[in-house]
Image (spheres, coloured by chain):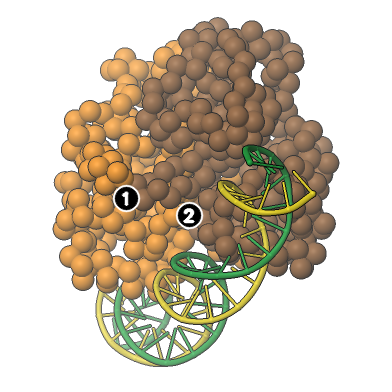
Chain colours: A brown, B orange, C green, D yellow
Amino acid sequence: MRVDRVLKGRSTTLTPAERAVLDASIREVRRYDARHILVEQGTTVHCSTLLISGLIGRHVNDPNGTQQMVSVQVPGDFVDLHGYALRTLDHDVSALTPVEVALVPHDALWTIQCEHPALARKLWFASLLDAAMHRKWVYRLGQLKANARLAHFFCETNVRLFAVGLSDGSRFALPLTQFDLGEICGMTSVHVNRVLRALRDEGLCTVRNAVVDIHDVPALARLAMFDPGYLYLDAPMAHRFALADALARLAR
Amino acid sequence: MRVDRVLKGRSTTLTPAERAVLDASIREVRRYDARHILVEQGTTVHCSTLLISGLIGRHVNDPNGTQQMVSVQVPGDFVDLHGYALRTLDHDVSALTPVEVALVPHDALWTIQCEHPALARKLWFASLLDAAMHRKWVYRLGQLKANARLAHFFCETNVRLFAVGLSDGSRFALPLTQFDLGEICGMTSVHVNRVLRALRDEGLCTVRNAVVDIHDVPALARLAMFDPGYLYLDAPMAHRFALADALARLAR
DNA sequence: CGGATTGTTGATAAAGTTCAAACACGGTGG
DNA sequence: CCACCGTGTTTGAACTTTATCAACAATCCG
């Protein structure tokens, strides 16, 4: 089903009935080319976008023309669910790769809120998960050095893609340029290039041909101080990537 | 009323009836000293905290002992509303000053969700506002230099406090140490000190005795690339602080 | 008053940016 | 098939920003 990946692998998931309700509220499915802008900052929106395949980026622009990516969405993500309550977005939404998206009209969401409060709560949860990721991005940019920032992003993306079946646990497609990575991690593409080489030289991970290959998952997580707690994974998933204990011991 | 400041000055506000419902769902009011930790990362929570007076900070810790502040809450903020759907928090919550907080049990929120969908939507909006601020913090840390980061934080805080009547539009109490400001803006307290002196020397703003005094609001906003759109203010408020047009013109 | 926290300053080192140039590589058109 | 173009990657050198370390001054508080 088109909504199979929504909240997949998370501590809160959808029941089959809820999935059916959500699926039924999809009005249409569309495809866009890479770099297509789906929603522009400031526009009033009447539908929310569920990402089915491909990658979508959300970015904040400033008058200088510089952009900061504030999130990368993977299949199963409700990209601009927040548009439902906010009505107008504070950032752009654009396709990083060719994408397939499902559109859910906001009045269908209103119906869900009135008639299916438990499902509404889960959608709320999904939007809070988004905020939790934002918080980690704040942490990443505020506290980590360039190499750890990139490492953290790769760890996060690895887990998120794994949760929806798009990573084998250490290797995944990530068709982003070094410039994109710079916009994600708050650094220039030149520096991204140098840091990637360093990560490769240390045997931690290789990024080539739009594929990220993590050679030593625990070591990369350690460098990145990556603990997947904020992703609210379900128990088996959390167990697979848990580093919490190791990190806690380290803290003492 | 205790909930008078909730969503005050925003594009979405509460009706008197909704305020009454929310107020009635408060179970108790508590006071804490500065530096008291209200919720620790990972704890399962059963109540959400509405800030009545004082300032609260939310911060992410890492095993090295460094902390990154991910938000500063002002009176009227529903500090950990997200705890309702997430159940466990991905960060600490602590008092930056002596505070007075109201506790709303999560089952009361569930009742609101079932019986008052319109109010539930507004609470959802409040949590999305939080996410919108996170996004700007990501932008701030990723794209701005130290002086602009501090300036941006002061601009944001000025507007937020003004919206709830705690700034006169350019001057407000902000009892944070330079170390705290460093944790907010991702820099060392030494560097905060130097940047504050520079801002003072340029005649932009002065921070002394726990009071921020912005001497030239538009100039500080320009340095910070501050546009309050992401705060979803109501029309008069937005108009008062709007810099959008000026910035848009600048962009061309 | 004494002790603890916060703020200030200087010297030095590290991290990251900028600018510029070269290189790789997959099209695409002749 | 080759020449050419555009996009993305790689490298070097000079420069800017920020961190680190260390000392000292100011302030607050009991």
Identify which residue is drawn at 46% across, 21% down.
A84
Disc 2 element:
helix
Packing grade of label 2 (10 A; few <14, some 14-19, many >=20) is: many
Q: Is residue B161 above or below residue A33?
A: below
Left or right of residue B19, residue A5 in this image: right
Q: Quadrant of the C terminus of chain B?
A: top left
Label 2: which residue?
A: B142
Residue A58 visible within the image: yes
Q: Is residue A46 above or below residue A248?
A: above
Identify which residue is drawn at 27% across, 70% down.
B198
Nearer to the camera, A232 or A91: A91
The spot of residue A32 in percent (x, y) is 59, 25
Packing grade of label 1 (10 A; few <14, some 14-19, many >=20) is: many
Q: Is residue A243 above or below residue A33?
A: below
Disc 1 element:
loop
Identify which residue is drawn at 82% across, 58% down.
A216
Q: Chain of mark 2?
A: B
The spot of residue C15 in percent (x, y) is 56, 71
Do marks 2 and 1 share a subunit?
yes
Left or right of residue B106, residue C25 in this image: right
Residue type highlighted by circle 1: Met
Q: Quadrant of the N terminus of chain B?
A: top left
Q: CA distance from mark 2 to mark 1?
A: 13 Å
Q: Chain of mark 1?
A: B
The spot of residue A228 in percent (x, y) is 69, 46
Q: Is residue B113 above or below residue A196?
A: above
Label 1: which residue?
A: B225
Q: Quadrant of residue A225?
A: bottom right
The spot of residue A39 in percent (x, y) is 47, 28
Residue type highlighted by circle 2: Gly
If you read the primary sequence from the N terminus, does the residue marked by circle 2 or circle 1 appear first?
A: 2
Identify which residue is drawn at 64% across, 66% down.
A194
